[in-house]
Image (spheres, rainbow, N blue to C red):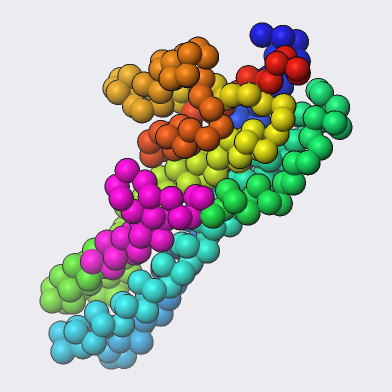
Amino acid sequence: MTEQERKINAALKRIATDYERLNDRQVRFAIREIDRVRHDITDLLADYADKATGKITKRRLNALLRELESIEKAVRTNGMSALEDVIKESSSYTTTAVNGAMEQTLGAAAIAGVTLDVIDRDVFRYVVNRFADDGLQLSDRVWRFAGEQRDELNRVLRSSIIRGDAMTQMIARVREVYANDTWKIERLVRTEGATAQRVGEAYYAQRSDVVKALKLHEGTCGRKDHNRHRCHILAQEDRHGLGAGVFLPDDSEYFAPHPNCTSYYTYVLADKYA
């Protein structure tokens, strides 16, 4: 590895580390955006409650459950909007940082012809439209999340009303549903955001004369079964005879090895820059 490659790859490692902190903030943002719907359901329960007893009668149960359709739609809308923001921010952060590192290390000529807004647009399209291993696109996963949450709210509210729970008890159980779903939101944000970050680096490499290949560095989740994770397997594979974990910028299998993956890339520079 040449001195120039060492400098570029040290910068890429810093970019990956800094992105993890950005992604933590993105998780909190998405949770807040989706969680705003909880206030809507609290207001809805208050509207359906008997003014004298503070409880919802059984005869109003079916009407209330039908109203949850609007809550589900709001979760889908807020969730998709939040994730689209995460994808755009992740790509823009990455391509801007990579471009800066390239210019600082190799000079302005090395970044000539690279148009960041075009890369960011293409990254967004790829991440939103890609089919993951589950056969679903991003919108499908958001719809599934919203539907599963509505089903659980149905179950909780039905049992609470039949049991004659007070409003405070019902609201507490609704809060529990949202709290239990937090990990699902986090997984979506970490998976889609990190995918956008990696695709941003790969698409930058595709459009640059500077980069010949990329090297995958596996994530560090700390789990005992990590050696079964796809990023670990790919990091050992010498697909093109360029070394373990080294792949070409068009090899999309490396873009999203598995959900919650924290793997990152470094660059193998073209011969004239190495």
In percent of width and height, residue 166 lies at 25, 75
Residue 172 visible in the displayed image: no
101 relative to 191 in the view: left or right: right
Q: In this view, does 33 lie above or below 274?
A: below
Find the residue positioned furthest to the left: 162
**Count of numbered circles on the image:** 0
Q: Can residue 8 be seen in this view?
A: yes
- Tell me residue 234's x, y (percent): 40, 23
The residue lying at 85 percent from left, 31 percent from top is 109
* Start-end of magenta stretch: 126-151
Residue 205 appears in which quarter of the rendering? top right
Q: Which residue lies furthest to the right in this view?
A: 108
Residue 132 at x, y = what percent? Answer: 36, 46
114 falls in the magenta region: no
Magenta segment's dominant SS is: helix
Name the one closer to the observer, 214 or 140.
214
Q: Quadrant of the N terminus?
A: top right
Question: In the picture shown, does residue 56 fall above or below 138?
Answer: below
Q: Residue 72: x and y, percent?
A: 35, 71
